[in-house]
Amino acid sequence: MEPKRTQLPLAPRIINSDDVYRLAIWQNVSIADFAGDVDALRMRRIARAHRELATAYPNGIVACTILRAGVPIASQGARDEAVKSLKELGDLFLRSALIIEDTGIMAQVLRTVVRGLNVFTRNTKLVLCNHIDEASGSLSPLVVPPHPGSNVRAELAAAVAEVRRDYAPRSVQQVAQR
């Protein structure tokens, strides 16, 4: 009798890592960890990664996005690029879970901007979450399992943690001063 083989979790693939954001791909999921102000050029790069991911996963993609404390509201140009990307992907963009780690007035403003994007794009695919486990729960039914019998929720949370591990961008204030 052969011993039972255990499936090793698949590691996320880092696509970009700088002082503003880290972007990775895991299965049909994009994982973005924002530590600074995202401009229109960076948003276009993220949109390109989403299009490439959608080509690889024609049944749809999801996104898990984390905004660290102190991240400012994206510029109008960046927000316009995000709306354009969502419209281009259409039904291929199944859901996006957004985690805002900040608290206080700025966090509320960010949440209001996100809700405004939902209204403007007539899109209810963008879900606000309080923590990674909540985001994993929201996204996991739409994630392509890495192997049969996967605990997708746990593996997605582990992939997000792996993307964030060792990512130590300069402080948001230092990035903003550039």
Image: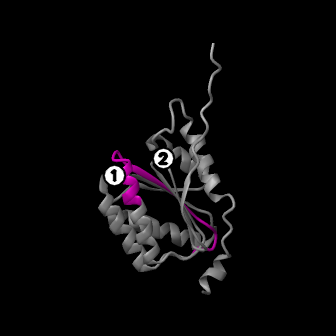
Tell me: residue 159, above or below residue 117: above
Residue annotated with mark 2: 27
Label 1 sits on a secondary structure element that is helix
Q: Does the magenta stretch include residue 57?
A: yes
Residue 19 image offset from top left, x and y in percent: 61, 74
Q: Which amino acid does label 2 sit on?
A: Gln
Q: Which of 119 and 25 is in front in this view?
A: 25
Q: What element carries label 2?
A: loop
Q: Are marks 2 and 1 in contact (CB under 8 Å)?
A: no
As shown in the figure, which amino acid type bears the numbered disc 1? Leu
Q: Which residue is drawn at 38% across and 72% down?
A: 81
**How many C-alpha atoms fall within 10 Å of the one at disc 1: few (<14), some, or many (≥20)?**
many
- The residue carrying pointer 2 sits among few (fewer than 14), some (14 to 19) or many (20 or more) residues within 10 Å by Cα, namely many
Question: Residue 88 placed where, x, y %?
Answer: 30, 62
Mark closer to the chain start, 2 or 1? 2
Q: Residue 130 in magenta?
A: no
Quadrant assignment for the C terminus = bottom right
Q: Distance between the residues labelled 2 and 1?
A: 14 Å
Which mark is in front, 2 or 1? Answer: 2
Q: State the extent of the magenta-drawn residues as a range.
A: 50-71
Quadrant assignment for the N terminus: top right
11 left or right of 62? right
Which residue is labeled 1 in the image? 92
* Residue at 64 percent of width and 53 percent of height: 162
